[in-house]
Amino acid sequence: MKRIFSGVQPSGRLHIGNYLGAIKSWIKLQDKYKCIYGIVDYHAMTVKYSPDDMQKRVLDCATSYLAIGLDPKKSSLMIQSAVKEHTELAWILNTITPISWLTRVPTYKEKSSQHPDDLNIGLLDYPVLMAADIILYKADAVPVGEDQLSHLELTREIVRRFNYRFGRVFPEPKSILSSGARIMGLDGKSKMSKSLNNCIYLDDTPDDIRKKLARAVTDPQRQRRNDAGNPDVCNIFSLHKLFSISEEIERVNKECRTAEIGCVECKKILAKNMSNDLTPIREKKLELNKDIDYVKDVLLAGIKESKIIAMETMEEIKQKIGVKYTFL
Ligand code: TRP
């Protein structure tokens, strides 16, 4: 079976952007691939974070994955820092990665302008650790959101360079782009992001969802109920396409343009559909939270399985790069 690795940062509660952008596709891939899904805690340390929260956030992340449908019988769920080969390999990859490849990465440019007083090397080196995450398991494919494509391109460049220098060890991982693409926040302006406070969280209740959608930005040109709207520029309509059935999408699309339906009603329909999708996840999470030992066991098993592959790859790499010492 071909192998997949993907990861998410334990950056607190998951929102529907995380869900549609990546995790939902992970679930479907479990039958076709051997999947390893990592909670990448070391990546989460490249910006200021609270050490006290980490444990809670990692566990919450694991619980969410299981609630969404990650099946520990098919896939491994692991924590990056618990398999130390990730950082070990990252160092080796550092020595073959030109700095210029890293400074041109869009996320680095963005983050370095957002956090000019906290420009740590980890922020620059982030894609190298990500490359290590992936190739440590010789992953053939990586399901990601659009924002991660440049990182993956860099991974392939690093792989090519490694294979060229030391002999072929790694496959070039291809990306599997999540269909949800770029989920915009409720402000309709920026990508859904916890720090921008424009999210619907996976464990929001139907009531939370209704209230949040009621305040969400729609077509900015449509000022009055009787104005015709333009679904093409309305973020609520984009969300309909992700949560509603095709008949309803068609209806909203048509009736918005003729002002037969107003934003309030359109949002009500969306709130209902979104709640229908998210309620089973929220309820499953509540159930898992009562049995947190089960979640811990899943993680321990996943770490163990990952560790076996990771150690094997490291042996092979050490041989290739000349640090497997026979005199030891
Ligand atoms: N950079 C990814 C993100 O922010 C997380 C990540 C880390 C990842 N390592 C990975 C994703 C390896 C896929 C594969 O979403």
Image (cartoon, rainbow, N blue to C red):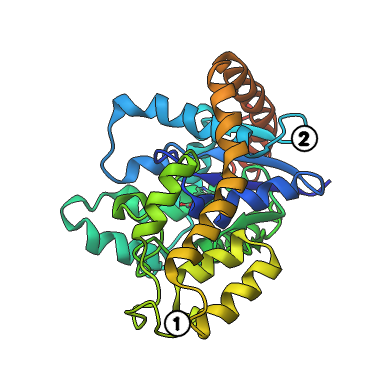
The percent position of residue 95, horizontal first and vertical second, equals 45, 52
Between 312 and 264, the one lying in front of the other is: 264
The disc at residue 74 is 2
The percent position of residue 55, horizontal first and vertical second, equals 41, 24
Q: Which residue is pictured at 77% across the width and 29% down the height?
A: 73
Label 2 crowd (10 A; few <14 / some 14-19 / many >=20): some
Disc 2 secondary structure class: loop
Q: Quadrant of residue 250?
A: bottom right
Q: Which residue is pictured at 70% across the width and 69% down the height?
A: 247
Above or below, 72 relative to 213 = above
The disc at residue 186 is none
- In the figure, is residue 186 to the left or right of 323? left
The disc at residue 229 is 1
- Residue farthest along the left direction in this orientation: 117
Quarter of the image with the C terminus in it: top right
| Residue type (three-letter) at the residue carrying disc 2 | Lys
Disc 1 secondary structure class: loop
- In the figure, is residue 211 to the left or right of 277? left
- In the figure, is residue 203 to the left or right of 106? right
In primary-sequence order, the first of circles 1 and 2 is 2
Above or below, 55 relative to 264 = above
Q: Quadrant of residue 281?
A: top right
Above or below, 60 relative to 136 = above
The percent position of residue 119, horizontal first and vertical second, equals 23, 53
Label 2 CB-ligand 1 distance < 8 A: no
Mark 1 in CB contact with mark 2 (< 8 angstroms)? no
Between the residue at mark 1 and the residue at mark 2, the CA separation in whole angstroms equals 46 Å
Q: Which residue is pictured at 47% across the width and 52% down the height?
A: 128
- Foreground mark, 1 or 2, reads 1
| Residue type (three-letter) at the residue carrying disc 1 | Gly
Q: Which residue is pictured at 23% across the width and 64% down the height?
A: 113
Q: From where the camera sits, is residue 52 visible?
A: yes
